[in-house]
Amino acid sequence: MITMDITLVIQVLNMIILMFLLNGVLYKPVKRILKERAEKQQAMQSEIAKFDKNARLRQQEVDEKMAKASGRAKAALDSARAEAQAAGDQKLGAIKAEAEATKNTQLADIRAQIQSAKAGLQANLDGFANDMASKILGRSL
């Protein structure tokens, strides 16, 4: 059975003193450390959010610069391609003109040869006709 004597009061006082001592020595420092830790985590989270925002902004800047550079490169490539096409067309035109001139020269030369051959044959036509007739008839005309 429980007896009410001085030891009960001493035990209650002992518990109260122990509670204040543990509160001062153990609980308050642990609570302070946990609070500091939570504050550090909160600060780190805000820094992480700030760094993440900066990283996204920089990535956007890099993407924009890459798009601009890609556009400039495409424009330069298109310009170079157009210049090459124009130069190729110009050379092709010159080659065609040269080939056409050569062809016309050769055709004129061939026509002149044909005309001279016709003229030569026309001039000898009477002689050929007489020779043929004398060969066919067997006598000279």
Image (cartoon, rainbow, N blue to C red):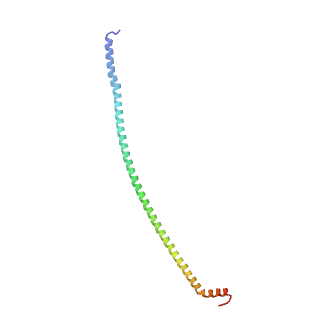
Residue found at the far front of this picture? 137
Instruction: Check the picture and name the quadrant holding the C terminus.
Output: bottom right
Q: Which residue is rendered at x = 33% and y = 25% of the image?
A: 24
- Residue farthest to the right, as pictured: 138
Q: Residue 68 appears at what percent x and percent y?
A: 39, 54
Which residue is painted at 35% across and 33% down in the image? 38
Q: Is residue 53 placed above or below 77 in the rendered structure?
A: above
Q: Quadrant of the N terminus?
A: top left
Where in the figure is residue 106, as x and y percent of width and height? 54, 77
Q: Looking at this view, is 11 or 100 the one in front?
A: 100
108 over 42 or under it: above or below? below
Q: Between residues 7 and 57, which one lies in front from this camera angle?
A: 57
Total labels drawn: 0
Displayed quadrant of residue 110: bottom right
Q: Position of residue 129 (x, y in %)?
A: 62, 86
Vertical order, 39 against 52 (above or below): above
Residue 57 appears in the picture as rendered: yes
Residue beneath the point at 57% across and 83% down: 118
Could you tell me which residue is drawn at 36 percent across and 35 percent down? 41
Vertical position of residue 57 compared to residue 96: above or below: above
The x and y percentages for residue 10 are 32, 14
Between 62 and 79, which is closer to the camera in this rendering?
79
Q: Hey, which quadrant is residue 40 in on the image? A: top left
Compare residues 86 and 15 and report the one nearer the observer.
Answer: 86
